[in-house]
């Protein structure tokens, strides 16, 4: 009898423990559900295009701190113009001039970028658009880090260039239009591309069988000849841009 009473007591104890555990588990599940609901309510992830559940993370070092360290204001200097107009030559000359002043720069060149980042793109209208979109986003990242960002791309379509400008903060995009006549570009023809295009060996070549849309309001316009009618040098062209950067305050850190 004693053994039976002890057994019944153990059973009742087990039942009571089971009830207590069930209650505790219910509370935990309820709290967990509330936590999930709370997390969902405060979640800031979102979708951008084909990307889902993403969130933009702000940099830990603010832009103004970086610009103060480099004593300059980040900006994109976007060279556009026909092949052979001197975009890369002037951009390279400008970068050297800025380096001599102790400024931090990056030069993104159309041909160079197609060796890596954009090696999967051709020269159709859609590929040209994507080419410029990618470079615009890369340039934006550099400018927002305080770097003087020089880009040299034919970028023939006005809409594509304006889309890049629209992604930038006010004052972060300087369009430099190399307004060099196609006749001069063909005379130079450093890569023999115009000759090949005229012979039909290259398709979709800007200025021949694909259009170039000139900017309406470029911040800087560079002409082939100077005020005296002489062919302008790359150094003088770069000097025009340096003067603009100085005047607009890009070669000093922004005032607090």
Image (tube, grey):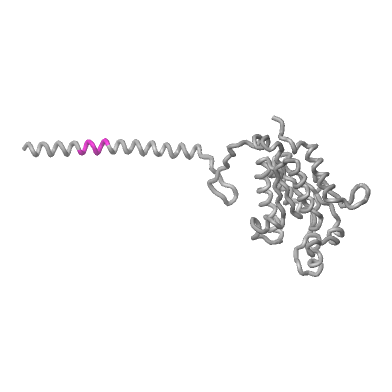
Q: Is residue 121 left or right of residue 202?
A: left
Image quarter of the C terminus: top right
Q: Quadrant of the N terminus?
A: top left
- Which quadrant of the view contains residue 201? bottom right
Instruction: Give the farthest residue toward the right.
Output: 228
Residue 89 against residue 66 in the figure, above or below: below
Position of residue 125 measured from the top left corner of the image (x, y, whole percent): 71, 59
> Where are the magenta residues, as a range?
14-20
Foreground residue, 145 or 200? 145
Foreground pick, 162 / 70: 70
6 versus 111 height, above or below: above
Horizontal side of 80 relative to 20 (left or right) equals right
Q: Is residue 213 left or right of residue 127?
A: right
Q: Position of residue 31 (x, y in %)?
A: 38, 36
Residue 239 among magenta residues = no
Image quarter of residue 105: top right
- Position of residue 182 relative to residue 6, above or below, is below
Point out residue 223 in the picture as x, y percentages from the top left corner: 86, 50
Residue extending farthest to the front is 100
Residue at left offset 68%, top offset 40%: 146
Q: Residue at x 79, y 67 (%)?
A: 196
Q: Position of residue 228 (x, y in %)?
A: 93, 48
Extreme top residue here?
Answer: 256
Number of marks in picture: 0
- Report the magenta stretch's main SS: helix
- Magenta stretch holds residue 15: yes
Which image quadrant is residue 60 in? top right
In the orientation shown, which residue stands out farthest toward the left? 1
């Amino acid at each position: 009898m004693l053994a039976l009473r002890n057994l019944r007591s153990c059973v009742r104890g087990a039942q009571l423990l089971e009830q207590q555990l069930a209650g505790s588990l219910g509370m935990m599940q309820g709290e967990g559900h509330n936590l999930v609901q709370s997390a969902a309510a405060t979640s800031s992830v979102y979708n951008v295009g084909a990307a889902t559940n993403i969130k933009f993370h702000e940099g830990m070092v603010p832009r103004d701190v970086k610009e103060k360290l480099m004593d300059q204001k980040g900006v994109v200097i976007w060279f556009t113009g026909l092949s052979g107009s001197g975009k890369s030559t002037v951009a390279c000359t400008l970068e050297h001039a800025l380096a001599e002043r102790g400024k931090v720069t990056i030069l993104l060149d159309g041909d160079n970028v197609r060796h890596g980042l954009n090696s999967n793109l051709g020269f159709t209208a859609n590929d040209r658009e994507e080419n410029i979109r990618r470079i615009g986003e890369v340039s934006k990242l550099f400018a927002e880090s305080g770097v003087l960002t020089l880009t040299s791309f034919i970028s023939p379509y006005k809409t594509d260039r304006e889309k890049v400008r629209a992604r930038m903060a006010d004052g972060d995009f300087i369009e430099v239009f190399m307004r060099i006549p196609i006749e001069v570009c063909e005379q130079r023809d450093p890569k023999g591309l115009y000759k090949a295009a005229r012979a039909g060996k290259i398709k979709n070549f800007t200025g021949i069988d694909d259009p170039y849309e000139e900017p309406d309001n470029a911040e800087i316009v560079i002409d082939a000849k100077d005020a005296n009618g002489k062919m302008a040098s790359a150094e003088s062209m770069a000097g025009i841009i340096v003067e603009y950067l100085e005047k607009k305050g890009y070669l000093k850190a922004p005032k607090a």
